[in-house]
Amino acid sequence: MAANPTILRPELTNLAPYNAGLTLAEVAARKGVTRVAKLGSNENPAGTDPAVVDALENAMRSIGAYPDPVGRNLVARLAEKHGWPQDKFVLGNGSEDLLAVLARAVLRPGDKVVTLYPSFPLHEDYARLMGAEVIRIGLDAEGMIDLPALLDAVAKPVRLVLFANPMNPAGVWLQPADLRRVLAAVHPEAITCVDEAYHEYASGPDYVSAEEQLATYARPLVILRTFSKAWGLAGLRIGYAMTNSDQLRQGFDLARTPFNVNLMAQIAAEAALDHPDAVDRAVALVRIERTRVAKAISDMGMRVLPSRGNFLFFDAGQPSSMIAERLLDHGVIVKPWRQEGYESWLRVSIGSIMDNDQFLMALARIREAAIG
Ligand SMILES: *Cc1c(COP(=O)(O)O)cnc(C)c1O
């Protein structure tokens, strides 16, 4: 029986279901597909480090007990890694959990939330769920973040400034000086959250983490990181927040569920931190492949935005859901964008060299069929 919408909160009935990427099994069930390139969810194609698997096998014997509700061991490791006090960290069941917790902790009906557009849908959904109003700052004609509009919007008395840097799905990012200008422009009463899910892929002279501001920024700041992308733990669900605000830290603890991060996830994240070299290797490969794939898409005559993530956002010039469907026929999973104004754009993750080749070959075939 279909749910009767009248029993749900009105804030819910306006939300669209999350557009999650297809699973391997869903695609493998298709006729004629022998190899699947899973390029829809920005996962690390190298998968899980063997040292992490070993740690998980050992941990299995302990799953009868509740996990540490604040993940002391993992937080101690993170505090050391970041040089930031342990009591300013909060763990989440994925960073998406922390986005929901942040919304629950600070957003009141009618509050205004500034975000970048095209957006990570959860940045908007959790805000709307709380009855807040979302203000979208888009890209300019060059496909770059509209900095003047962003500076203007954050200076107004909004409740929350929440954006990903680098942006997902667009992949574009704020130059260090621009990030500093934005943070400096934020209204004195606003809370800022920078979602750095793709931090590991972005580092270089033209990118800086908001982390550099934690110790000096005079207003509440939250930085989100995740183990799902470069660290290869998407299936376990673990991410973390760093903040400069005791109030926010307390708010997160009150608004989250007490055991939000399971034991296996805590153990795996600790083990992963012991092997940063695996991440470095994965990142190095993504950077090379990102350049190669971007050039190939552009050589086919399609517009592709510069990216500091492990993905590319490109305009196929045709309905994205149709192109995605054709790519599926070739065993390639991508994410067709559906937000207004971007219905001909797709996001493709950078995978292994073989995955990327499979994608490029399929895309070329589809283009040829359309033209010829
Ligand atoms: C993937 C992603 C997340 C979610 O990561 P999880 O830790 O797996 O929940 C959060 N923010 C952005 C911008 C992402 O792309």
Image (cartoon, grey):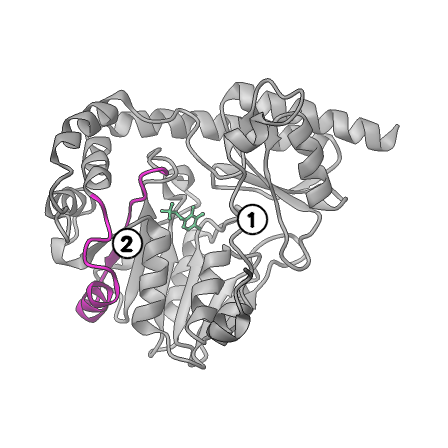
Q: Quadrant of residue 295?
A: top right
Q: Closest to the observer: 181 or 242?
A: 242
Q: Secondary structure at mark 2?
A: helix
Nearer the camera: disc 1 or disc 2: 1
Name the outermost residue toward the right. Answer: 372
Q: Are marks 1 and 2 in contact (CB under 8 Å)?
A: no
Give the residue at mark 1. 170
The residue type indicated by label 2 comes to Glu
* Quadrant position of the N terminus in the picture: bottom right
Mark 1: give few (<14), some (14-19) or many (20+) Cα within 10 Å: many
From the top left corner, tell me how far across and down residue 184 is, in percent: 37, 68
Q: Which residue is mark 2?
A: 212
Residue 62: x and y in percent read 12, 35
Residue visible at 24% across and 53% down in the picture: 260
- Choose between 41 and 142: the one closer to the eye: 41
Looking at the picture, which amino acid does disc 1 mark? Ala
Q: How far apart in space, not on screen, are marks 1 and 2 (Cα)?
A: 24 Å
Q: Residues within 10 Å of mark 2 (few under 14, many from 20)?
A: few
Vertical order, 361 against 261 (above or below): above
Which residues, given as a range, are shown in magenta?
234-262
Q: Nearer the viewer, residue 12 or 280?
A: 12
